[in-house]
Amino acid sequence: MDTPQPDRIFQTGMAFWPSKILLSAVEMEIFTDLARHPGDLATLTGRLGLHPRGARDFLDALVALGFLSRDGQGIYGNTPETDLFLDKRKPSYIGGILEMANHRLYPFWGALTTALRTGEPQNEARTGEDMFAKLYADPARLREFLRAMSGVSRGANLAIARQFPWGGYRTYVDAGTAQGDLAVQIALANPHLTGIGFDLPEVGPIFEDYVAENGLTDRLSFTGGSFFTDPLPEADVILYGHILHDWDLDQKKHLLRAAWQALPAGGAVVVYDSIIDDDRSVNAFGLMMSLNMLVETSGGFDYTGADCQEWMREAGFRDTRVEHLVGPDSMVVGIK
């Protein structure tokens, strides 16, 4: 029998060190800068506004963590992954979620113990503010948040665009569309489809700009509204991408009933989140995401595929299934 070792305990307990190093690098746009101009220590210290005391350790830590390269002449540059995914000038940029993690989630998670003991959110709600109201009232913060949602959802969006049997459908609604990346990826992969992005009216201009950037204005449109007070637009398929986990159980069930009412017979609802495995012992990311909902919302939580299928059947959907997408994300499909 192997002797127990403390390595994993230390690595997890101190995991905020590499996390904050990467988040600070994204905040300072180091990867965007290096994509254009690799440089040595002295050059980067000045160009990035770093203090000499910490500059070398910081850059070398990024090398040791696998986020930067350094050649024999001491020139720092991006790795293939950071060059593709963390250069803001590239359409493949996924750093929006990291920007949000740095500005919002990192400090709020410092109060996880309080959340676990009180069951109360530890974000803006601590001072009586409504997180979404404050977010949607600030166009710059809203744009950052919606870009973050695209970043964290991109892999699953691409998988749904390819994996779901779209050939039997003509129209779809992306409910809670945010920037519109799910709607865009589906349209790009399936030229026969037309779609609608549904979200609060403040999202409209951001959605329309993103759709225009992708050349899809003729096939994608926006409808403003709240899925708690307004009916969903009618379509063959209704999708909730990273939406259900924001809400409490009654609200989750309301969203599924709203989808059932907007769909024709044979229509489909597609729900995807970091679906927790039914045994609740494997998908650690899904369980941690549920704790993030504890920190961020008044009633939200993540759930298992079996949970979601039960709620779908309760709403009236006759056939349900769970399919893995990518990483921790899976989709639950219900047919009316």
Image (tube, grey):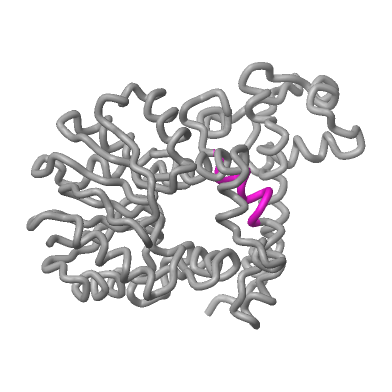
Dividing the picture into quadrants, the one containing residue 8 is: bottom right
Residue at 68% across / 41% down in the picture?
64
Which of 147 and 163 lies nearest the eye of the viewer?
147
Number of disc labels = 0
Q: Residue furthest bottom?
A: 117
79 w.r.t. 249: above or below: above
Dividing the picture into quadrants, the one containing residue 305 is: bottom left
299 w.r.t. 56: above or below: below
Q: Is residue 209 magenta?
A: no
Residue at 38% across / 70% down in the picture?
251
Residue at 29% across / 70% down in the picture?
308
Q: Residue furthest front?
A: 229
Location of residue 138 in the rendering, given as x and y in whole percent from the top left corner = 62, 43
Q: Residue furthest top?
A: 37
Location of residue 327 in the rendering, given as x and y in whole percent from the top left corner = 40, 53
Q: Which residues are magenta?
A: 95-105
Using residue 64 as the reference point, say whether residue 162 is left or right of it: left
* Quadrant the C terminus occupies: bottom left
Using residue 289 as the reference point, say whether residue 128 is left or right of it: right
Dividing the picture into quadrants, the one containing residue 280 is: bottom left
Which of 297 and 26 lies nearest the eye of the viewer?
297
Q: Main secondary structure of the magenta part?
A: helix
Q: Is residue 98 magenta?
A: yes
Residue at 34% across / 42% down in the picture?
223
